[in-house]
Image (cartoon, grey):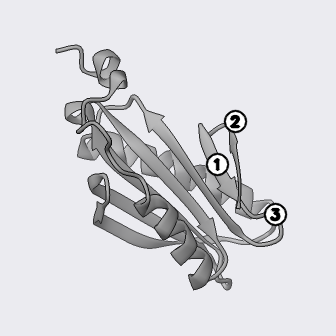
Amino acid sequence: MLGHVGGDVEFVIERPDALVRGGMSVSTRITSDAENEKTFGEVQASFVRDVAELSMRVEALGGGPVTTALGAGVERAWRVAGTSVELRLVLVPICAGTGSIVFVQAYGDPYARSVLDGWMDSFRWTNGRNLTACDFLDPK
């Protein structure tokens, strides 16, 4: 896996010869049901647009609560119809819900997903949940 910083997502890992790509970002959007739905809707709309350019369509796979190594989160997943290509988005609230860590995964098979799940589960809090970013997101 190759990693790089920058672009639309702060940190990306990928393998150029296979469909296995993960990204991690920090969102400053409040983590409420309504705001999470906006985030999921924006990602879905972007995915639908990209897939439509290939004359294909996207089907929603659903989602819901998920447990991660960083805590409770919420996820959604979509598939390119007629293929095994999937996109998954996981939001993990941070800073008393004033932001979230966002993981995005794109993969073409179950093994690639398991690699990305292992990567996502490798993240750990080193100093509790007191992040420097929380001083900005949740100034108290």
- Of tags 3 and 2, the one toward the viewer is 3
Q: Are marks 1 and 3 in contact (CB under 8 Å)?
A: no
Q: Residue at x 51, y 40 (%)?
A: 25
**Dots 3 and 2: beta carbons under 8 Å?**
no
- Disc 2 residue type (three-letter): Gly
Q: Residue 77 placed where, x, y %?
A: 47, 67
Q: Quadrant of the N terminus?
A: bottom right
Structural crowding at the residue carrying mark 3, measured as other residues with C-alpha within 10 Å and reported as few (<14), some (14–19) or many (≥20): few
Residue type at mark 3 is: Pro
- 78 or 128, which is in the foreground? 128
x%, y% of residue 61? 45, 74
Which badge, 1 or 2, is on the more N-terminal residue?
2
Vertical position of residue 13 compared to residue 5: above or below: below
Q: Residues within 10 Å of mark 2 (few under 14, many from 20)?
A: few
Amino acid type, callout 1? Val
Residue at (80% x, 60% y) in the render: 53
**Contact, mark 1 vs mark 2 (Cβ under 8 Å):** yes
Mark in front: 1 vs 2: 1
SS for callout 1: strand
The image shows residue 6 at horizontal and vertical percentages of: 68, 34
Viewed as shown, does residue 122 lie left or right of 31? Answer: right
- Report which residue position mark 1 lands on: 12
Residue under label 2: 7
Q: Give the alpha-carbon distance from disc 1 to disc 3, as whole Å.
A: 12 Å
Q: Which residue is mark 3?
A: 16
- Furthest residue to the front? 126
Q: Earlier in the sequence, mark 3 or mark 2?
A: 2
Q: Judging from the image, what secondary structure is the residue with disc 2 in?
A: loop
Question: Residue 69, position in %: x, y?
Answer: 32, 59
**Can you name the residue that lies furthest to the left here?**
140
